[in-house]
Image (tube, helix red, strand yellow):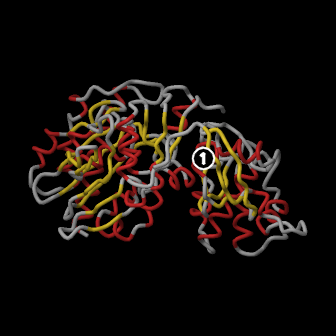
Amino acid sequence: MREPAAHKVVKVEVNGTVYEREVDARRLLVHFIRDELDLTGTHIGCDTGNCGACTVLLDGHTVKSCMLLAVQADGASIETVESLAGEDGELHPLQQAFSARHALQCGYCTPGMLMSAKYLLDNNREPTEGEIRKAIQGNICRCTGYWNIFEAIDAAAKGEVSA
Amino acid sequence: MLLPPVEYVRPSSLADALAVLEADEGARALAGGQTLINVMKARAAAPDVLVDLAGLEELRTISRGADGALELGAMATYTQLVLSPEVNESHPVVAEVAETIADVQVRNRGTIGGNVCSSDPTNHFLPLMVALEARMTIAGAGGERTVSAEEFFLGVYMTAVGPGELLTRITLPGGRSAGFSAVTLGADGTCIVNAAAGLNGGAPRIAIGCVDAIPVRAGEMERRLGGGELGEEAVREAARGLGAGLDPPSDVHASAEYRRHLAELCAARAVLQAAERRRG
């Protein structure tokens, strides 16, 4: 069988591109994404699993990438906030809704908020008010008071992105 | 944050996982990691080897036994419990409680095995396992053994899972109606006090959490209720005085006196919910 090791070659697909890197077993996934892959859209907020700024999709499910080792993601498919906009730069409907509804001020929580919102809409096309609130429970925003974020997700769910 | 240096392995069979845990007493099982990774960041633990159980698909299964029991693999995530038709049909309280733990991202990773093995006195599933008469199956080099939930929880962060062993599954006997009640910090936050009740024909089985190192049975309340009617007045009356027999902690969130009060409140609510569920 495979032996325990302090370093490991990790192969992950991130936003459609396959990366293979040797990493320390103790390296957190969020550092791997930001520092090794140079995808700095994913933010580190609290680094304790509370704030959700580091939220990414791992095999289709949201996770906090500061509470996961990079080696745990070996073989997985990851989507970060960089995957949302099209190749031509056209923003994802959620991003358009966030922009139109002023759903951000400082923007620090936004990458995580967007990934949590995407996870919700991927799995629930007609979320209720309660379901939207519950969906962003793991994401802390210190600027907006959440109301505009809620409205933006609601608008994106209803296809009303530009208003 | 930089974690302490650690080695990592993701075995593909239970036997391989047990072999690593057996070979190195500094090895620790890594389930969802929603507790352990933070504990390592805080330098409260520094395992030599992390044995990632993610490759053991057999620990993720949820099924119903022929006798109506619900079998929960230790690596079943909270999200799996919330969505499982088997859980919702046989023990809906387990799905309801899982849905109140932390947040979406944590529920996507955190596991029921990790919840009970961390044996944090404020965890949701501890009193529920006791009230539902859960049987915990522990695998080791010498084979499997099964202990009751009451034998499983030994103290703060301590369980019957010994060195070189793993919790593999939790069996919840069928035919029970159950209730759960908690007072938490914020909507789905940490429990200040929680309580669970299970009904199986005779007297209710009631366990209180967060008031001691391990869940506490409300023996006197169980005796008072016996097999009698579980009307609101009778249940609230039976809970009276329960708090006086407890020695809960006092902290910034609640005084010991307030926790004694909440214990009576939560125990009554849990029994009433179980009774209502039994009525259908």
Which image quadrant is residue B208 in? top left
Image point (41%, 42%), residue name? B183
Badge 1 sits on which subunit?
Answer: A
Q: Position of residue B130 (x, y in %)?
A: 24, 46
In the rendered view, tell whether residue A51 sits above or below residue A17: above
Image point (49%, 39%), residue name? B50
In the rendered view, tell whether residue B263 sits above or below residue A132: above
**Callout count:** 1
B51 or A35: which is nearer to us?
B51
Side of B124 where A99 appears, left or right: right
A55 or B26: which is nearer to us?
B26
**Could you say whether the residue bearing mark 1 is in a helix, strand or loop?**
helix
Side of B250 where B153 appears, left or right: left
Q: Which quadrant does the C terminus of chain A fall into?
A: bottom right
Q: Mark 1 points at which residue?
A: A71
Q: Position of residue A14 (x, y in %)?
A: 72, 58
Which image quadrant is residue A133 in? bottom right
B65 or B150: which is nearer to us?
B65
Under mark 1, the amino acid is Val
A104 or B56: which is nearer to us?
B56
Q: Where is residue A112 in the image (x, y as percent from the top left)?
A: 70, 52
- Disc 1 residue crowd, few under 14, some 14–19, many 20+, Cα 10 Å: many
Give the farthest residue toward the right.
A88
In the rendered view, tell whether residue B66 sits above or below residue B55: below
Side of A3 where A17 appears, left or right: right
